């Protein structure tokens, strides 16, 4: 999973552009981003202090494909998957093993924009009778997951009208 566009860029998008963030790790994303923006730097006199200070200011936020990982090794679904597979569980996220149920996930408006671009492709694939049935089924399932993420993101937006089954609550 690629590291993001930078802590300062994330802070700017949140605070100045009012980017919305949803998902189980949204509050932690906001907290870490604000904490990194508050760090003004320090004068370091000892070489041994450099790594310690850099580690303290690392937000451990990773922007991936249509998702953002607010990484915490103890709760990372990808780490648990690696351990189950007998693979070494390093401290960073692994997007190839990411699970939609991971509590480390957050979705920014940027992630939702990527989902909105992917959704019509999946819907078309799910409806294409020339596509083999297992591929259609997988595309339909993925489209359903993406639609649920988009809907949750939009309904959690401050001031959004919450709906239940398409009807106003």
Image (tube, helix red, strand yellow):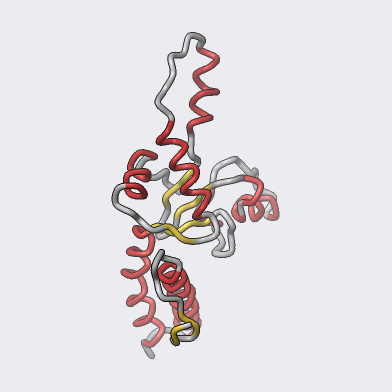
| Vertical placement of residue 51 versus 153, above or below | above
Task: Point out residue 75 in the picture as x, y percentages from the top left corner.
Answer: 64, 51
Left or right, 16 with reference to 47: left
Q: Please name whichever residue, 117 or 163, is drawn nearer the observer in this view of the structure.
A: 163
Q: For this rendering, which residue is in front, 96 or 7?
A: 7
In the displayed structure, 5 sits above or below 119; it is: above
- Residue lying farthest top? 45
Does 109 appear above or below 131? above
Q: Quadrant of residue 101?
A: bottom right
What residue is shown at x 53% (from left), y 16% (from top)?
49
Instruction: Left or right? Give the position of 14 relative to 30.
Output: left
- Please, which residue is most extreme toward the bottom here? 129
Q: Quadrant of residue 102?
A: bottom right
The residue at 66%/47% (across/down) is: 74
Find residue 121 and report its horizontal and vertical position in percent: 33, 75
86 vs 146: above or below: above
Question: What x and y, as percent, mark residue 82?
Answer: 64, 51
Query: Across the whole image, how many numbered discs are drawn on residues?
Result: 0
Q: Residue at x 43, y 71 (%)?
A: 155
Residue situated in front as seen by the camera: 51 or 42: 42
Tell me where residue 38 sits by quadrant: top left
At a point 45% along the width and 87% down the height, the residue shown is 167
Q: Position of residue 3 (x, y in %)?
A: 42, 43
């Amino acid at each position: 999973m690629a590291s993001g566009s930078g802590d300062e860029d994330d802070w700017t998008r949140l605070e100045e552009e009012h980017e919305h963030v949803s998902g189980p790790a949204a509050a932690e994303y906001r907290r870490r981003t604000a904490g990194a923006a508050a760090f003004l730097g320090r004068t370091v006199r000892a070489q041994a202090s450099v790594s310690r200070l850099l580690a303290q200011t690392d937000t451990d936020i990773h922007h991936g494909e249509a998702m953002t990982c607010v990484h915490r090794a103890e709760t990372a679904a990808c780490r648990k998957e690696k351990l189950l597979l007998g693979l070494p569980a390093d401290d960073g996220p692994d997007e190839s093993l990411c699970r939609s149920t991971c509590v480390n996930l957050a979705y920014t408006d940027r992630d939702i924009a990527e989902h909105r671009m992917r959704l019509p492709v999946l819907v078309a694939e799910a409806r294409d009778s020339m596509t083999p049935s297992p591929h259609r089924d997988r595309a339909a399932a993925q489209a359903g997951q993406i639609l649920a993420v988009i809907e949750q993101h939009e309904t959690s937006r401050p001031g959004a009208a919450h709906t239940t089954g398409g009807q106003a609550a």
